[in-house]
Image: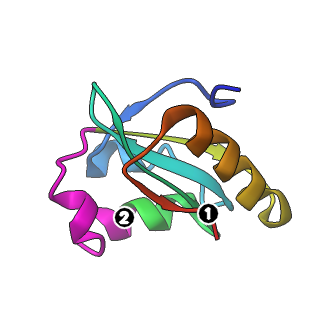
Amino acid sequence: MPWQNEQTYELNDQQIWKAPTKPGVYGLLKPENWLFIGCTANIQESLREFLSGKMPWVTEQHPSFFAFEVAPKPACGARCSQLSGEFKPLFLNCI
């Protein structure tokens, strides 16, 4: 099942504000592959942390875009696992 919000956004300070400050699943990608998919309590905050260098193992892969979907905390892990099974990211955090 694809992302509920099929739109991707450029990974930069100007675009991150489009992400909600709600819990859900987010992904970081290059045009050719998914680098990271994970759960978070605050999608926008997690994207800002990424841009500040808090995930160097992903930063080294030079993601260009992000995607997200809002999901309540109890459902986040299962949804993250579904998306990771479909998109096969290099890194994963479905906790």
Q: Residue furthest bottom?
A: 54
Q: Residue at x 24, y 66 (%)?
A: 57
x, y percentage for residue 27?
Answer: 47, 46
Q: Residue furthest right?
A: 74
Q: Earlier in the sequence, mark 1 or mark 2?
A: 2
* Dot label at residue 20: none
Q: Residue at x 47, y 67 (%)?
A: 45
Q: Which residue is mark 1?
A: 94
Q: Residue at x 19, y 50 (%)?
A: 61
72 in the magenta segment: no
x, y percentage for residue 83?
Answer: 62, 40
* Dot label at residue 48: 2
Considering the numbered disc 2 on the image, is that residue within a helix, a strand or a loop?
helix
Which quadrant holds residue 56? bottom left
Is residue 52 visible from the viewing direction of this image?
no
Horizontal relation, residue 43 to residue 74: left or right: left
* Magenta part of the chain: 48-64
Q: Which class describes the residues within 10 Å of circle 1: few (<14), some (14-19), or many (20+)?
A: some
Horizontal relation, residue 38 to residue 81: left or right: left
Q: Residue at x 29, y 75 (%)?
A: 54
51 in the magenta segment: yes
* Vertical relation: 56 (above or below) 43: below
Looking at the rendered structure, the kind of residue marked 1 is Cys
